[in-house]
């Protein structure tokens, strides 16, 4: 009986100790370290603006050519460039109809040249239900050209292939 009482007392003491530790940790939480997503460059001196929509117009037709929705818009003071740290969705329009949909981790736009790039787990969906994945896509506005400089994976119905460096002229 004495051994059983000692064992019970030991368990009660152990349980009280665990409870004390849990209550202490809850009362004194450690401050969370801010996490910086991978592949997204830092921009010192930039201004963060929040949720945004950016529309890029086709210079020939005057209609919306690209519509970009993103979070954490950053404007770089020296170059005027616009960066979305989190790209919600970029949509390419042709003739007023949606042709491509792009998702990625970040979006960088140069208003002087109207070129932009999206990067970090880029997924492009569009033509004939085709899906393309890569790490970086660049849009050259002057040439109306899409460039994927790295590895590219293409999925089209039952077809899947990989290649390196793809250049596309959508018009």
Image: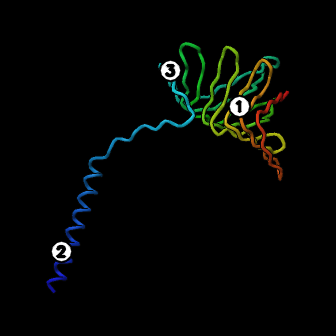
The residue lying at 82 percent from left, 17 percent from top is 60
Question: What element does badge 3 sit on?
Answer: loop
Residue 9 - label: 2
Q: Nearer the viewer, mark 3 or mark 2?
A: 2
Determine which of the numbered discs, if any, sits on residue 46 in the image.
3
For marks 1 and 2, give the CA distance: 66 Å
- The residue that disc 1 covers is 137
Quadrant including the C terminus: top right
**Residue 72: percent from left, percent from top:** 53, 30
Q: Nearer the viewer, residue 90 or 155?
A: 155
Q: How many marks?
A: 3
Element class at badge 2:
helix
In front of the other: 93 or 118: 118
Q: Nearer the viewer, mark 1 or mark 3?
A: 1
Tag 3 near tag 2, CB within 8 Å: no
> First in sequence: mark 1 or mark 2?
2
Q: Residue 97: percent from the left, percent from the top?
A: 80, 33
Sequence-earlier tag: 3 or 2: 2
Secondary structure state at the residue bearing disc 1? strand
Q: Residue at x 68, y 33 (%)?
A: 136
Whether 15 is drawn above or below 3: the answer is above
Give the side of residue 154 with respect to residue 112, left or right: right
Residue 48 shown left or right of residue 125 in the figure: left
């Amino acid at each position: 009986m004495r051994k059983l009482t000692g064992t019970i007392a030991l368990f009660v003491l152990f349980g009280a100790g665990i409870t004390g530790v849990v209550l202490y940790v809850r009362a004194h939480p450690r401050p969370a370290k801010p996490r910086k997503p991978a592949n997204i460059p830092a921009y010192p001196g930039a201004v963060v603006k929040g949720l945004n929509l950016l529309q890029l117009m086709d210079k020939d037709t005057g209609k919306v050519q690209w519509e970009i929705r993103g979070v954490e818009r950053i404007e770089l003071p020296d170059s005027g460039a616009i960066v979305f740290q989190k790209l919600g969705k970029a949509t390419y329009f042709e003739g007023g109809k949606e042709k491509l949909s792009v998702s990625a981790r970040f979006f960088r736009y140069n208003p002087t040249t109207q070129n932009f790039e999206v990067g970090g787990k880029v997924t492009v969906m569009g033509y004939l239900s085709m899906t393309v994945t890569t790490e970086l896509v660049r849009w050259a506005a002057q040439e109306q050209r899409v460039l994927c400089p790295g590895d590219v994976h293409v999925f089209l119905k039952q077809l899947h292939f990989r290649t390196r460096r793809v250049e596309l002229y959508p018009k």
